[in-house]
Image: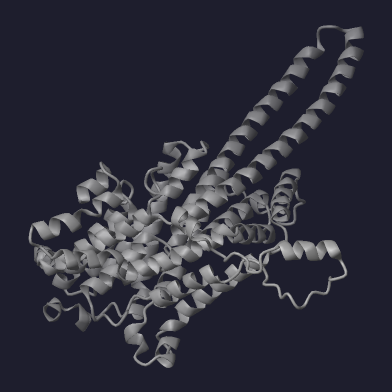
């Protein structure tokens, strides 16, 4: 399956169905227990989260958020790039990375085009003004001396040409930087929440699979507390790196402290304003979706915060045992199919009865409006392949634990006990960051995490000490267009050569591994008690 996932000879999702056929045939596990893995608790959480994300996309709420933030942050080149990155990262925490990128790149494109057009207009005007002057001067001079002036004029002209070619190069570089920053920010942002991207869900599922009594150590709140600061750090470093490599660090020019807005910046601002105007005022449906979205996030955070009792424990007897993060996700998803998309109207109360046209229109309208979400939309937009991919991974992990493969792998890795744990974690992060460039992120996490868990058991270090960096590194697909869908989307717009992506991506991978190593050795330690070897991780008690 690993070979098939890496080479994609058949679609990823189809490869994931192999355990259903081969585990029963080879006597590894019964069909019943294999098939149970394909839609377990973690996968339901993923489906619930995706349905909410689809409703946000459906009502264009993500575009409204994006434009609002960009208008607040301003349009100086450096701040514009930061704006694009912040917005993309924030949205991809909740919506799929692919959808976020697909929405942001056209906005970036429109802003860049407008800046180019304005610059072009300004230079044309300057040139036109310059040319008329030159013609008049030439006519005056020609009367006296027909030969001399041409040389000096030509010199001026050639310097203008070289200047404009420099500007063209610079514009191309800015274009590359602005589009690249979107796909990088999408990958970075996805790591911050448990439902943000596939590998995080794989970790959650594998933890429940391999360590059934792990006291729900990885949940929405604990993951966010660990990964969100790491995301902020990575975003800042990535932004500085893209600034350096594509725009140069000219602070006065790119930050524009106290300088007047240029025509280009005004143009960019106007584009954003126009896009915002197109959306119109916030509709009833958008407001409802926003409300549901905020409610879901609150329910996730307050279910089992760790430092106080969550609502699961307070409201329901034995709540912490029964309720996981998937319950609120599916609850909100259900509400989206029930709540109306338009304001419900009450027949008895109509102040405009005197207006006959108005009432006729009202009577024609159906009494009940359509719901916020339609199943056909969900069916069209849901990435079913990822759901199957996760399921196949869980089936593999379950079988390798039950058949004793994990234990055997762990034994092979006992020599690693002599290496300090931080070195192990860093090396493994690097290996995964390289490996994920040529395979799907979810497949990478699925292949490596069970191996890491058995290794941790044999070396007697906390399983999360190697599994957390491994999971985060699986999202660091920065180097190739094929590495992850956001890269492919950005690449398809044609501003970027593969070499540009590889060059920026190598440094991005190093930044990523550095941040993860830092996170796991500083604030990660007290959060997950990584210095201890927990009782639930002892494989002998689990068997």
- Residue 426 percent across, percent down from the top left: 29, 61
Which residue is at 66% across, 65% downward?
Answer: 366
Q: Is residue 455 visible?
A: no
Q: In this view of the protein, which residue sits in the foreground, 484 or 386? A: 386
Which residue is at 28% across, 61% downward?
Answer: 391
Quadrant of the image containing the C terminus: bottom left
Which residue is at 55% across, 72% downward?
Answer: 292
State left or right for residue 42 relative to residue 394.
right
Which residue is at 83% across, 74% downward?
Answer: 351
- Residue 352 percent across, percent down from the top left: 84, 70
- Residue 313 percent across, percent down from the top left: 40, 90
Q: In this view of the protein, which residue sits in the foreground, 468 or 317? A: 317
Quarter location, residue 453: bottom left
- Please determine whether, in this image, residue 3 is positioned above or below residue 67: above
- Residue 193 percent across, percent down from the top left: 43, 68
State left or right for residue 109 relative to residue 5.
right
State left or right for residue 173 relative to residue 487.
right
């Amino acid at each position: 399956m690993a070979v098939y996932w890496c080479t994609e000879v058949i679609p990823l999702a189809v490869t994931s169905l192999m355990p259903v056929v081969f585990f029963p045939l080879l006597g590894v596990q019964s069909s019943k227990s294999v098939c149970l893995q394909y839609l377990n608790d973690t996968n339901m959480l993923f489906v619930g989260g995706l349905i909410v994300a689809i409703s946000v996309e459906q009502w264009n709420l993500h575009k409204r958020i994006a434009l609002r933030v960009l208008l607040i942050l301003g349009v100086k080149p450096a701040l514009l790039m930061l704006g694009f990155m912040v917005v993309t990262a924030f949205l991809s925490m909740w919506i799929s990375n692919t959808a976020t990128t697909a929405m942001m790149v056209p906005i970036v494109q429109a802003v860049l085009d407008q800046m180019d057009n304005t610059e072009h207009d300004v230079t044309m005007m300057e040139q036109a003004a310059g040319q008329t002057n030159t013609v008049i001067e030439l006519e005056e001079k020609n009367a006296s001396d027909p030969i001399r002036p041409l040389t000096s004029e030509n010199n001026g002209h050639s310097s203008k040409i070289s200047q404009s070619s420099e500007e063209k190069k610079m514009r191309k570089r800015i274009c590359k930087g602005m589009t690249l920053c979107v796909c990088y920010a999408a990958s970075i942002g996805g790591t911050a929440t448990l439902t943000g991207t596939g590998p995080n869900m794989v970790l959650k599922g594998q933890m429940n699979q391999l360590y059934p009594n792990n006291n729900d150590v990885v949940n929405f709140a604990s993951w966010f507390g660990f990964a969100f600061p790491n995301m902020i750090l990575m975003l800042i470093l990535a932004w500085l790196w893209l600034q350096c490599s594509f725009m140069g660090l000219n602070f006065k020019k790119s930050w524009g402290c106290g300088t007047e807005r240029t025509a280009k910046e005004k143009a960019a601002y106007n584009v954003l304003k126009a896009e915002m105007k197109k959306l119109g005022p916030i509709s009833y449906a958008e407001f409802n979706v926003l409300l549901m979205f905020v409610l879901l996030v609150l329910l996730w955070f307050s279910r089992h915060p760790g430092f106080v009792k969550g609502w699961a424990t307070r409201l329901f007897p034995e709540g912490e045992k029964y309720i996981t993060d998937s319950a609120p996700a599916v609850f909100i998803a259900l509400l989206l199919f029930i709540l109306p998309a338009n304001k419900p109207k009450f027949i008895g109360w109509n102040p405009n009865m005197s207006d006959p046209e108005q009432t006729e229109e009202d009577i024609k309208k159906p009494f009940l409006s359509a719901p916020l979400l339609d199943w056909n939309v969900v069916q069209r937009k849901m990435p079913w392949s990822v759901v199957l991919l996760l399921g196949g991974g869980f089936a593999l992990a379950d079988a390798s634990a039950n058949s004793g493969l994990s234990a055997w792998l762990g034994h092979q890795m006992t020599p690693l006990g002599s290496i300090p744990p931080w070195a192990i974690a860093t090396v493994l992060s690097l290996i995964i960051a390289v490996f994920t460039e040529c395979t799907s992120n979810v497949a990478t996490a699925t292949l490596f995490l069970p191996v890491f868990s058995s290794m941790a058991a044999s070396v007697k270090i906390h399983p999360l000490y190697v599994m957390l960096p491994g999971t985060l590194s699986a999202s660091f697909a920065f180097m190739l267009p094929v590495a992850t869908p956001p890269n492919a989307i950005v690449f398809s717009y044609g501003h970027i050569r593969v070499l540009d992506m590889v060059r920026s991506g190598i440094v991005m991978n190093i930044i990523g591994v550095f941040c993860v190593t830092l996170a796991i050795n500083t604030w990660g330690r007290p959060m997950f008690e990584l210095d201890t070897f927990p009782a639930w991780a002892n494989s002998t008690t689990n068997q």
